[in-house]
Amino acid sequence: MFETAQPQMQENLFATFFIQPVRMGYKSEQAGHDVYEDVVHIRIKSPGDNLTEVVREASELDKRRFAHQWAYFQQSQSGEEMVIGMPVTEWAAISRSLAEELRAKGFKTVESLANASDLQLQSIMGGSGWRTKAQAFLKQAEDSALVMKQANDIKRLEAMIENLKGEIGRIDDKPRRGRPPKEETKED
């Protein structure tokens, strides 16, 4: 998480912009594993009030309202790339220390590790093994994504069928308008 170093006061409030990884539901479902995207957030505090703090995704209004802080944040982010994928820090197959080592060497996502060349992995102990594990993890996730998608589609279709059955039941229960049907007479 990156924050602007020096918050500034605006309207008697301190505001700082920062990057927070956010799990993308649809993309995660499609990939079969958690997919995160970096999203700009804002933290707003009132001076002298240590109990109240607002932290949320930054809106265009926030960027205009706290224009100086936004400009400072943009300037500090000029060389930083936005990360899309599963962060190595969220991958359960590796230790926290290895995750930090990978991040320090530029491998921020499992996808970047899986696509790394032998040359890129030279400085990492067991690098090609970790690449193979990352590739296997992503392949398994891709395969399970299809199964999860099919299961979700089945649930969605079952819910639609139940809704339609309910609609049909309500239609059948409604009294009919117009003349009642003729009664059949018996001819002897």
Image (tube, grey):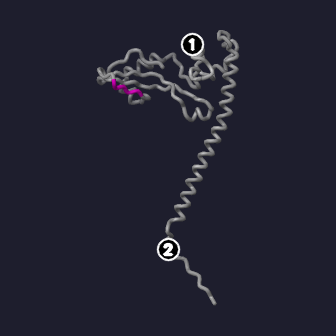
Q: Depth check: 171 or 76 in front?
A: 171
In the image: residue 78, left or right of residue 184: left
Q: Is residue 54 magenta?
A: yes
- Is 27 drawn above or below residue 135 in the view shown? below
Question: Which amino acid type corresponds to the residue marked 1 in the rendered image?
Answer: Ala
**Position in image of residue 54 (x %, y %):** 38, 27
- In the rendered image, the quadrant that contains the C terminus is bottom right
Horizontal and vertical percent for residue 48?
Answer: 29, 20
Q: Nearer the viewer, residue 54 or 155?
A: 155
For badge 2, the amino acid type reads Gly
Q: Residue at x 68, y 33 (%)?
A: 143
Q: Indicate left or right for 113 with 175 as reference.
A: right
Which residue is disc 1 drawn over?
A: 104
Q: Is residue 84 magenta?
A: no
Estimate the x, y position of residue 135 in percent, counting from the top left: 68, 24
For the record, the magenta segment spans 51-55
Residue at image position (57%, 53%) is: 162
Q: Residue at x 52, y 76 (%)?
A: 180
